[in-house]
Amino acid sequence: MEINRYIDHTVLKPTTTLEDIKQLCMQCVEYDFAAACVPPLYVKLAKQFLGATNTKVATVIGFPFGYSAIEAKVAETVLAIVDGADELDVVINISAIKNKDWEYLEKEIANIMYLVREKKKVIKIIIESGILLEEEIVQCCQLYAKYGVDFMKTSTGYAERGATVEAVKLMRANLPANIQIKASGGIRTFTFAKELIEAGATRIGASASINIVKESKEAQ
């Protein structure tokens, strides 16, 4: 298993510096990670550092709580695309889920998907599975499958509970085969990453990426 190509090497802490981004991108090139996931402020810089390498530039929209207005998320999406982002990890409105306001969530994704598809970008929908009921996760799968998103993503990493094997299995069982799953939040070891991949994840979001790669080599 070439675990490196599953990984979105990530730095999203609020204190992220230019030096952090430079180091992250250098590590992405060295380890050939799938993507560098950076705060919106640093998309242009990451794009410059990564150049024509295999590593894509990913950024976040509505991060980390998801309750910003639809118009704000649309504006963030436009700016991220203009700055050169290849992949957009969008936090949906968790409050709307808890209010059972699926009409609002449909409006939100419809507005964002139009931009993403027009510019041929990849969209990953973050549902924060660790704080949702099973039936809420299933409803999310049904809604976002309808709109043909590229990935469903388990977590931001900022909730009290991140990725779990159970959540990935539940998502996989309720999504069509063409929609992939990104597991993120609390993934620090190769063993856990492998369990998530075996459960159905095709992308892993992690800041402990290098440790995961080193452990995978030791396990061979």
Image: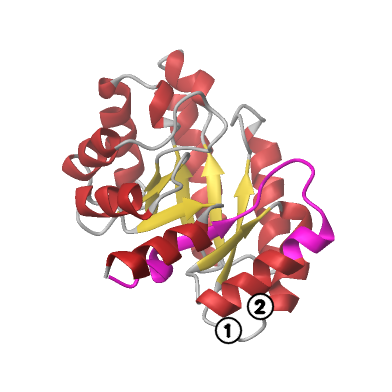
Q: Kindly identify the residue that appears in the image at 26 percent across and 40 percent down.
A: 171
Membership of 6 in magenta stretch: yes
Q: Report if residue 128 is visible in the image.
A: yes
In screen coordinates, is 94 left or right of 202?
right
| Residue receiving disc 2 | 50
Q: Residues within 10 Å of mark 1 (few under 14, many from 20)?
A: few
Q: Which residue is nearer to you in this view: 156 or 145? A: 156
- Image quadrant for the N terminus? bottom left
Is 201 rendered above or below residue 107? below
In screen coordinates, is 122 left or right of 12?
left
Q: Give the range drawn in magenta.
A: 1-21
To which quarter of the image does residue 162 belong? top left
Q: Which residue is nearer to you in this view: 77 or 211? A: 211
The total number of labels drawn is: 2
Q: Do the residues labelled 2 and 1 touch (CB within 8 Å)?
A: yes
Q: What element carries label 1?
A: loop
Is 30 rendered above or below residue 197? below
In screen coordinates, is 60 left or right of 130?
right
State the residue lying farthest toward the top: 99
Q: What residue type is labelled 1?
A: Thr
Is 59 rendered above or below residue 156? below
State the residue lying farthest toward the bottom: 52
To which quarter of the image does residue 161 belong? top left
Residue 87, how many percent across, how many down? 54, 61
Tell me the CA gap for discs 2 and 1: 6 Å
Residue 97 - label:
none
